[in-house]
């Protein structure tokens, strides 16, 4: 499986407004779950693939994240102080630090159990067939997920947008080729734009996560995430 990525884009620039008062004095990635900031849980996932480089985008109270990670190696920051660029724009701004070719992207507002998320993606990545490989769970098994599903997947793992069929939730972890990003003229845009191109070309695929996942986008997600982690420790 050629061209295994060695760089990680970690998204950490959002305001975390759904967390209410919890983000009044800190960015969402610094909210603690099971005694550790969310960003540390995300970095555990990244560490499993021993990346050459991790780039973290920052906007709200960036100094807290910079200080927390000051002693970490192989971490660089992409400053979005002037304006949040969304996931696609944020990735494009960070590409000079990430380097060419496919890369991992990872959200910083979730916790995981089971096999390391990025390692699962690496084991299935095939650059000859894929421009996007997304980590998924059946929507009903994704703790804290409130949608009906994002994608459907065929027997070969190829995905398309969900349209009412039993479907999978995207877990905020993927391998993505940024090769089409130059065709997007907007400064602020979502990675959905790149997914739509990959889907149209039949080069978007999914992998079902071997473990549990919990979204921590709302205050109640903290207790749900701690319960998930506790259950995994008890097994």
Image (cartoon, rainbow, N blue to C red):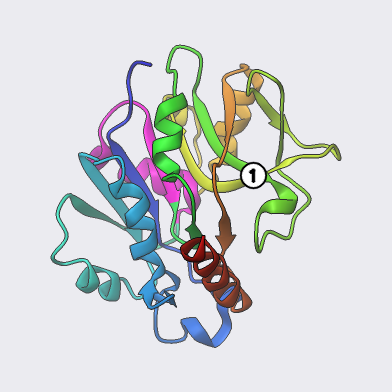
Residue 102 magenta-drawn?
Answer: yes
Q: Image point 48% across, 71% down: which residue?
A: 15
Front one among 228 and 68: 228
Residue that mark 1 sits on: 137
Q: Image point 33% across, 64% down: which residue?
A: 40
In the rendered structure, which segment of residues is drawn in magenta?
A: 85-106
Q: Is residue 197 left or right of residue 35?
A: right
Q: Image point 75% across, 55% down: which residue?
A: 147
Residue 190 magenta-drawn?
Answer: no
Residue 80, can we see it?
no
Q: Image point 28% across, 76% down: which residue?
A: 64
Tell me if residue 35 comes above or below residue 81 in the rendering: below
SS at badge 1:
strand
Looking at the picture, how far across and down is residue 160, in whole percent? 70, 29
Front one among 79 and 72: 72
Looking at the picture, how far across and down is residue 199, in whole percent? 64, 24
Q: In which quarter of the image is the N terminus?
A: top left
Looking at the picture, how far across and down is residue 94, in whole percent? 31, 45
Q: Residues within 10 Å of mark 1 (few under 14, many from 20)?
A: many
Q: Is residue 189 left or right of residue 166?
A: left
């Amino acid at each position: 499986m050629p061209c295994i990525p060695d760089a990680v884009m970690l998204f950490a620039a959002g305001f975390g407004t759904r967390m209410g008062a919890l983000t009044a004095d800190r960015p969402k990635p610094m909210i603690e779950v099971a005694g550790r900031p969310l960003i540390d849980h995300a970095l555990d996932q990244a560490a499993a693939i021993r990346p050459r480089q991790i780039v973290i985008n920052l906007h709200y109270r960036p100094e807290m994240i910079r200080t927390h990670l000051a002693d970490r190696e192989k971490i660089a920051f992409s400053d979005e102080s002037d304006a949040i660029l969304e996931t696609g724009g944020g990735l494009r701004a960070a590409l000079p630090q990430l380097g060419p070719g496919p890369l991992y992207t990872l959200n910083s507002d979730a916790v995981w159990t089971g096999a390391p998320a990025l390692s699962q993606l690496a084991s299935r990545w095939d650059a000859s067939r894929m421009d996007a490989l997304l980590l998924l769970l059946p929507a009903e098994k994704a703790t804290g997920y409130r949608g009906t599903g994002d994608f459907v997947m065929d027997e070969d793992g190829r995905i398309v947008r969900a349209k009412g069929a039993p479907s999978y939730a995207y877990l905020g972890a993927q391998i993505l080729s940024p090769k089409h990003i130059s065709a997007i003229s907007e400064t602020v845009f979502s990675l959905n734009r790149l997914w739509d191109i990959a889907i149209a070309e039949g080069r978007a695929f999914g992998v079902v996560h071997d473990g549990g996942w919990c979204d921590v986008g709302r205050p109640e997600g903290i207790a749900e995430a701690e319960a998930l982690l506790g259950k995994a420790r008890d097994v």
